[in-house]
Image (cartoon, helix red, strand yellow):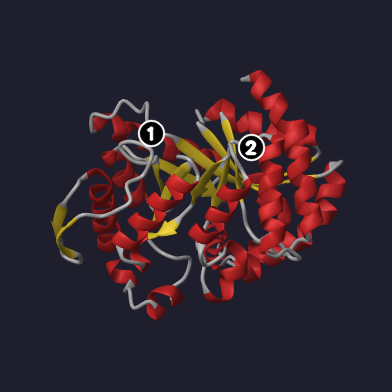
Amino acid sequence: MKFGLFIMGTKSSGYKDIVEQVEYAEELGFESIVLGERHFRHGDLLYPSPYSMAAAFAARTSRIRIGMAARVLSLDHPIHIAEDAATLDILSGGRLDFGVTRASLDEECHVVFQSSLNESTMRFKEALEVIVKAWTEEKFSYEGSVYKIPRVSVYPKPIQKPYPPISIVAVSPETLIFAAEKGYSVVVGAIRSICELERVYEAYRRVLHENGHNGMNAGFTVNRFIYVSDTFEKAKSEIEGPFLEFIKNRAPDLRSALIFRYGNEGNFSFDRFINDFFIIGSPETVTSRIKELTERINLSHLLCSLNYITLDHSLCVKSMELFAREVIPNLTTSH
């Protein structure tokens, strides 16, 4: 199992702080650094220009892979995305993991960028086809319902052949099935319970095999909210308020999903979140919780959300450091 860091903004950080944190993450041994894409009032959460940030990461690191979870394909023209991603793959020396998603976390982006949310599935599927063609064919044309592209040559081509690893953020069952049918890796989580993850994993593997994919190149990554401190009590006192604020005010997609699960916000409780999906505590407690997860699901990657926009940057970095130094070694030794 490999460990990636899902890099969000923190309460007191700027761009320089995040770049320095990524350098430290490489030093600590994380396999990958993963960015999201958010705009407007959520821009400080995951940054509105992920490839610009990723290029800065590439310039300051040498080993760590640089991924997306994910580039919103329905918000931009696929040739622009193909060009930017291939350029990043070259600048990073072939370290790009190309993660994509269908839609933004709320409707505002689709209104502003004039990309109807109702058309997002069609745009997403066609865009992915165009990007793969742009990377693998010297010249190509495309005639879709959304994109109509005359015969063109797109440059540059990525270093990784035939193209960088592709993963799809699978929020809905339909997206999960699409990814499995095509043989693409998936990223799932971050609020799914272990029981839900087991069902999702089995469905993904079943559709993979039904479509002739042996699964060797199709990874199953789980995103998990994690917070590590010296003791469980200290971790809870430090993160409870900030995490509840994060869910209430900074994560509309997660808030809506949790309302659907629990009935209403009145049923939200931090202890319930810990029981269902949030891994917090001492290094020993966090190690035990992750072992429980890996014993029930054959994970290829664990994507660790250790930054919180509502928590001071120094506490996020300390949690990351404890996780890397006192959790990862115990998990890699036991697997």
Residue 30 is marked as 2
The amino acid marked with disc number 1 is: Ala
* Residue 169 shown left or right of residue 293 in the figure: left
Number of numbered discs overlaid on the protein picture: 2
Residue 187 is marked as none
How crowded is the residue under tag 1: few (<14 C-alpha within 10 Å), some, or many (20+)? many
Tell me residue 129's x, y (percent). 24, 51
Image quadrant in which you'd find residue 313? bottom right
Using the rendered image of the protein, determine whether residue 272 is visible from the camera's viewpoint: no
Tell me residue 116's x, y (percent). 31, 74
| Screen quadrant of the N terminus | top right
Residue named by callout 1: 218
Identify which residue is drawn at 64% across, 71% down.
Answer: 249
At mark 1, the secondary structure is loop
* Residue 124 shown left or right of residue 244 in the figure: left
| Screen quadrant of the C terminus | top right
Using the rendered image of the protein, determine whether residue 227 is visible from the camera's viewpoint: yes
Image quadrant in which you'd find residue 267? bottom right
Identify which residue is drawn at 39% across, 74% down.
Answer: 110
264 versus 3 height, above or below = below
Q: For marks 1 and 2, give the CA distance.
A: 20 Å
* Residue 35 shown left or right of residue 330 in the figure: left
Tell me residue 233's x, y (percent). 86, 46
Q: Earlier in the sequence, mark 1 or mark 2?
A: 2
The amino acid marked with disc number 2 is: Phe
Closer to us: 134 or 118: 134
